[in-house]
């Protein structure tokens, strides 16, 4: 194979969304994946597109807003290539807010089963997706680029990046299956990145909602969120999450943590006491010290580009990350000020 324009390491939502965007712009792309594509954080997520979560850093706002506006086109592009429709699951979120913020006088008008307790809620115009549904379609879209068009994305599973040498004119990457040169390398290795990114574990559970709780709205407090699935194979379920833990690369699920999450959710929605447990799992968010992603060229190696550290918002930020990193790689003006995400800030 001729030398590709770009080699991406990591086939999570960030790596595959970027690969698709670069491919759409006519570039040749190889994606190296250490294990199975879309099997780590990107399918452990709840799928909230929480651009207006008051706990997000302020510096994330512009990128998050761009991503929200790109989302419908992002899903359409994946649907066109995969033949799979990816619906938004919800269109609103009841967000617990601090006492000085504007709040709804009657949140029970929207969710009659809600027991707000001491919480005050505002209503956010926010959507969510089912990350597993999205993952399947995204992977199919990436694979179909090889069937539909001449020069498709070359996705290599079970092929970890083991070494990288970036020079002034090209990069050379090594894997157990051999080495490869390319114009640029992009690190999308999530929590496994050698950049200043650390795994932040999240445990969650899924339940089947009782008929008495036909929830259509996300409910989110500082401690807990309840995210209903309304369309597709998981319709009628809700995701309850999530812990935020510094536990290294441990992916064990602890029943006591799952019971605590369930109890906190049931305090808000007592009807959840009738819900049926479906499954529990854990994933590793790629976290940075300032909760902001790392986007851009490495300070000393311009052909070594970073796109990781998306922490709690990688599903939300995938379209904007793909868009701005593709602009950067192709030498275009970038639509968002990337200064807050500068890899040199640590
Ligand atoms: C419990 C939980 C709930 C979440 N909820 C939400 C939510 O509601 N909304 C939201 O926007 N975000 C949410 N997130 C965050 C979101 O899931 C992540 O930010 C996002 O998935 C990160 O994507 P990624 O592609 O960077 O990482 P990953 O999906 O982890 O992908 C990284 C990939 O790199 C591969 N890799 C590692 N090392 C190598 C190597 N040496 N060579 C090649 N490949 C390698 C890995 O195998 C993996 O496939 C949640 C996360 C968790 C854990």
Image (spheres, grey):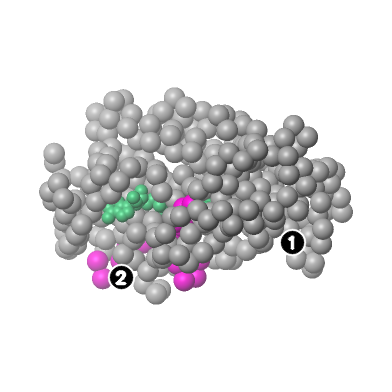
Count of numbered badges drawn on the protein: 2
| Classed neighbour count for the residue bearing mark 1: other residues with Cα under 10 Å, few (<14), some (14–19), many (≥20) | many
Q: Is mark 2 within 8 Å of ligand 1?
A: no
- Counting from the top left corner in percent of width and height, residue 279 is at 55, 42
- Counting from the top left corner in percent of width and height, residue 285 is at 46, 57
Which part of the image, by quadrant, shows the C terminus?
bottom left
Given contact means CB atoms under 8 Å apart, are the residues at marks 1 and 2 in contact? Answer: no
Task: Quote the CA–CA distance across marks 1 and 2.
Answer: 39 Å
| In this rendering, position of residue 28 left or right of residue 177 | right
Residue under the point 41% across and 49% down = 40
Question: Residue 284 lies in magenta, yes or no?
Answer: yes
Name the residue furthest bottom: 346
Residue, disc 1? 97
| In this rendering, position of residue 156 left or right of residue 85 | left
Whether residue 189 is situated above or below residue 57 in the rendered picture = above
- Counting from the top left corner in percent of width and height, residue 94 is at 73, 50
The region drawn magenta spans 282-301
Residue under the point 13% across and 41% down = 2
Whether residue 214 is situated above or below residue 336 in the rendered picture = above
Secondary structure of the residue carrying numbered label 1? strand
Question: Residue 166 lies in magenta, yes or no?
Answer: no
| Classed neighbour count for the residue bearing mark 2: other residues with Cα under 10 Å, few (<14), some (14–19), many (≥20) | few
**Which callout, 1 or 2, points at the residue further toward the start of the chain?**
1
Taking the image as drawn, is residue 318 in sight? no
| In this rendering, position of residue 55 left or right of residue 161 | right
Residue under the point 54% across and 39% down = 130
Residue 158, quarter of the rendered image: top left
Instruction: Please tell me the numbered disc located at residue 299.
Output: 2
- Counting from the top left corner in percent of width and height, residue 52 is at 64, 56
- Predominant SS of the magenta segment: strand
């Amino acid at each position: 194979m001729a030398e590709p324009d770009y080699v991406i390491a990591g086939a999570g939502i960030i790596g595959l969304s970027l690969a698709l965007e670069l491919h759409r712009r006519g570039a040749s792309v190889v994606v190296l994946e250490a294990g199975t594509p879309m099997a780590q954080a990107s399918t452990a997520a709840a799928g909230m597109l929480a651009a207006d979560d008051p706990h997000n850093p302020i510096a994330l706002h512009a990128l998050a807003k761009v991503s929200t506006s790109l989302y419908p086109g992002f899903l359409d592009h994946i649907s066109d290539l995969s033949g799979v429709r990816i619906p938004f699951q919800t269109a609103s979120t009841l967000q617990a807010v601090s006492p000085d913020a504007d709040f709804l006088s009657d949140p029970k008008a929207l969710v009659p089963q809600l027991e707000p307790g001491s919480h005050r809620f505002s209503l956010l115009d926010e959507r969510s997706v089912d990350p597993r549904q999205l993952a399947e379609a995204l992977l199919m879209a990436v694979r179909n680029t090889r069937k539909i068009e001449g020069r498709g994305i070359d996705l290599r599973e079970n092929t970890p990046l083991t070494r990288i040498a970036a020079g002034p004119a090209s990069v050379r990457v090594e894997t157990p299956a051999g080495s490869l040169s390319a114009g640029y390398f992009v690190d999308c290795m999530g929590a496994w990145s050698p950049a200043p990114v650390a795994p932040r574990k999240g445990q969650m559970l899924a339940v089947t909602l009782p008929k008495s709780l036909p929830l259509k709205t996300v409910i989110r407090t500082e401690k807990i969120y309840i995210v209903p699935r309304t369309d597709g194979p998981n319709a009628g379920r809700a995701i309850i999450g999530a812990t935020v833990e510094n536990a290294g690369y441990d992916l064990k699920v602890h029943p006591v943590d799952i019971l605590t999450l369930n109890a906190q959710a049931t305090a808000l929605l007592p009807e959840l006491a009738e819900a049926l447990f479906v499954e529990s799992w854990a994933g590793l968010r790629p976290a940075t010290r300032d909760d902001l992603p790392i986007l851009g060229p490495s300070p000393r190696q311009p052909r070594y580009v970073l796109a990781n550290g998306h922490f709690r918002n990688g599903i939300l930020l995938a379209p904007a990350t793909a868009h701005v990193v593709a602009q950067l790689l192709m030498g275009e003006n970038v639509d968002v000020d990337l200064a807050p995400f500068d890899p040199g800030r640590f």
